Image (cartoon, rainbow, N blue to C red):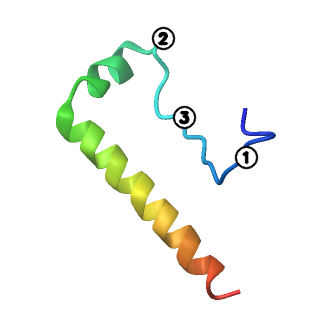
Amino acid sequence: VLIGAQMPAILTEIAFLSNKEEVRRLQDERYLEAIARHIVAGVRQYTANLNTL
């Protein structure tokens, strides 16, 4: 999916819409905020590690 991207990009797969429990979670604002915080933390950790190479 990201092959040929003309800018830095990440692909995240958060949930399966065929899973009813995951669909339920995706409707919870707190769950979505937690996912967003974890994605941001991962990107920050990755970029911090780039600066140490």
Amino acid at circle 1: Gln
Instruction: Name the foreground residue: 3 vs 35.
Output: 3
| 36 left or right, relative to 30 | right
Instruction: Report which residue position mark 2 lands on.
Output: 18
Q: Marks 3 and 2: which is nearer the front?
A: 3
Image location of residue 51, percent across then percent down: 61, 84
Image location of residue 22, percent across then percent down: 37, 23
Instruction: Report which residue position mark 3 lands on.
Output: 13
Q: Which mark is residue 16?
A: none
Q: Secondary structure at mark 2?
A: loop
**How far apart are labels 1 and 3 at the CA level?**
21 Å
Instruction: Report which residue position mark 1 lands on.
Output: 6
Q: Would you identify the image quadrant in which residue 20 lies?
A: top left
Name the quadrant of the C terminus: bottom right
Q: Residues within 10 Å of mark 3 (few under 14, many from 20)?
A: few
- The answer to whether the residues at label 2 and label 1 have Cβ atoms under 8 Å apart is no
Q: Secondary structure at mark 3?
A: loop
